[in-house]
Amino acid sequence: MTEKLEDIAAAMVAPGKGILAADESSGTIKKRFDKIALASTEDSRRDYREMLFRSTEAMKSYVSGVILYDETIRQKAKDGTTLVDILRAAGSIPGIKVDTGAKPLAGPTSTIETITEGLDGLRERLTEYYELGARFAKWRAVITIADGLPTWNCVKANAHALARYAALCQEARIVPIVEPEVLMDGEHAKHDIDECYRVTEWTLRTVFRELYDARVSLEGMVLKPNMVIAGQRAPKQASAAEVAEKTLKCLKATVPSSVPGIAFLSGGQSDEAATEHLSLMNAAGGLPWALTFSYGRALQAAALTAWGGKPENVAAGQRAFTHRARMNGLAALGKWEAKLEKAA
Ligand code: 13P
């Protein structure tokens, strides 16, 4: 495997491929397993992820890289092979979540706003993760839209942490996925698509200014943003065409063309909406960067349900996962069509 940051970043966003986010923290994966009434144990988490990573067709054809959690990057499959080796054998790049979570941001908005932690000791952790096989990393900052929010303090502090993280990654020869997520959930009635546009533009501008100050090489990173979309509970929802149009407008206004690729998070969109939006944007064409997926829920939800925690359902889980991976691979080329969902 090549070791130059630019080459790794280019491979992460190769045509028709995207990233599987499988880096759910122990708390988050428990919530996902609760839905299928499965106890979250080291073994059940391993079995679930082993099922996904052994979906050979999906991994080889559509998944350029996988974001792992600290536990997972150290885990072995039932037969003793490390999960990292399973990914490598399928030609998929192992990545690692390195932030330690979004914590209340001290101050007057601490019941809502968060700052992502994990910078202390990060240099040493990155060295270890590199040795364990990670060639890219992820850090997720969370920005919440609410009445009068976000504050500049929250946007600025999170952008600054992202830049410090990204600089440490590049020093360690690891490609940083820079993820500033403007959440689509929340109760705010005025959280329509235009409010999301305003906050996303503000956030991305701030992030790129901080990346510049920290001398982060834009050629050696991948941006993982939210799409510009109405809040989940906003009375006025936007059409798929409007989401695609406003997301592209916002990204073109804020993301330098030296960034090789943008890999969206799904953020609570339905599986098909996340796929359709991505496909519409790629079909529009003329983009200065590769545009693909780095989905967690929108790639895994169907597979998790089909598997249901039962060994006899591994093949069904893998079929469901492979289908979503293929649909999103097509979307990364702008070639997804609704009728392909029905055919499957
Ligand atoms: P979702 O696609 O479920 O939003 O997860 C992606 C991710 O990695 C969030 O940090």
Image (spheres, grey):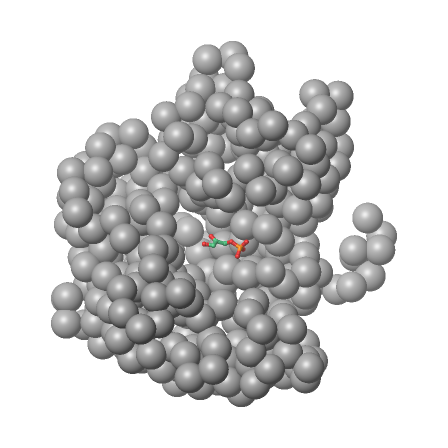
Residue beneath the point at 36% across and 45% down: 97
Residue beneath the point at 41% across and 79% down: 149
Residue 232 at x, y percent in the picture: 63, 71
Task: Identify the image quadrant of residue 315.
Answer: top right
Residue 58 at x, y percent in the picture: 61, 40
Residue nearest the viewer, comparing 21 with 333: 21
Point out the image quarter for the N terminus.
top left
Is residue 1 rendered to the left or right of residue 322?
Answer: left
Q: Is residue 237 above or below residue 14?
A: below
Give the total number of marks visible in the rendering. Answer: 0
Q: In the orientation shown, which residue stands out farthest toward the top?
A: 79
Q: Is residue 243 above or below residue 44?
A: below
Residue nearest the viewer, comparing 207 with 36: 36
Residue beneath the point at 24% across and 57% down: 166
Task: Identify the image quadrant of residue 340.
Answer: bottom right
Residue 211 at x, y percent in the picture: 22, 68
Residue 180 at x, y percent in the picture: 38, 65
Residue nearest the viewer, comparing 311 with 95: 311
Q: Is residue 239 above or below residue 232?
A: below
Q: In the orientation shown, which residue stands out farthest toward the right?
A: 343
Q: Is residue 227 above or below residue 94?
A: below
